[in-house]
Image (cartoon, rainbow, N blue to C red):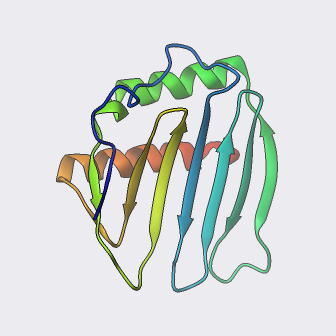
Amino acid sequence: MEIFGQKDSNQKLPDTWTEDFTIELNLSGNRDGSYSKMKFTYTSCEYDIYKRNATRSNKGTKALTENDRNQILKFLKKNKVETFTSEQMPVRDGYRSSVCFQPGFCMEGGTGTEMSKENKTLFNTVYAYLSSFPNR
């Protein structure tokens, strides 16, 4: 069993978004072949999203402004992502999703993840907010 989001000194978001801070989202292992990969850096958001029945993936890069960075950090802090914990159990089949803050910690979700109702709501809220960025 792997433990994610344990409370330690690394599980802290920066006060301001520095050039070495990144956020990565991943969703993989869906039976229909769909996946999502996103990476937020100081200057941009790179994304590659494939949905079931699509003829090709939606790939691109969107600029990340100072206002975007501030709004994202404000949202994450307001939702207290630093309190998140979950446990990954071995699973042969199923999907896996994650939101990783580097340097720092990861929030893990998916078929083999056990977490409280509050942490499940938190994970889904954060994942939905960040994954909607390319469409804003």
Residue 25's x, y, as percent?
Answer: 56, 51
Instruction: Tell me the quarter of the picture where residue 45 sits.
Output: top right
Quadrant in which the N terminus is drawn = bottom left
Residue 83's x, y, as percent?
Answer: 27, 34
Q: Is residue 9 above or below residue 128?
A: above
Q: Is residue 20 above or below residue 58?
A: above
Q: Residue at left 50%, top 19%? A: 14
Q: Is residue 72 left or right of residue 92?
A: right
Q: Residue at left 47%, top 49%? A: 127
Quadrant in which the C terminus is drawn = top right
Residue 85's x, y, as percent?
Answer: 27, 46
Pick the residue in front: 128 or 40: 40
Q: Which residue in the rendered view is the most extreme toward the top?
A: 15
Residue 67's x, y, as percent?
Answer: 65, 18
Q: Is residue 36 above or below residue 20?
A: below
Pick the residue in front: 115 or 76: 115
Q: Residue at left 40%, top 25%? A: 12
Instruction: Tell me the quarter of the picture where residue 56 sits.
Output: bottom right
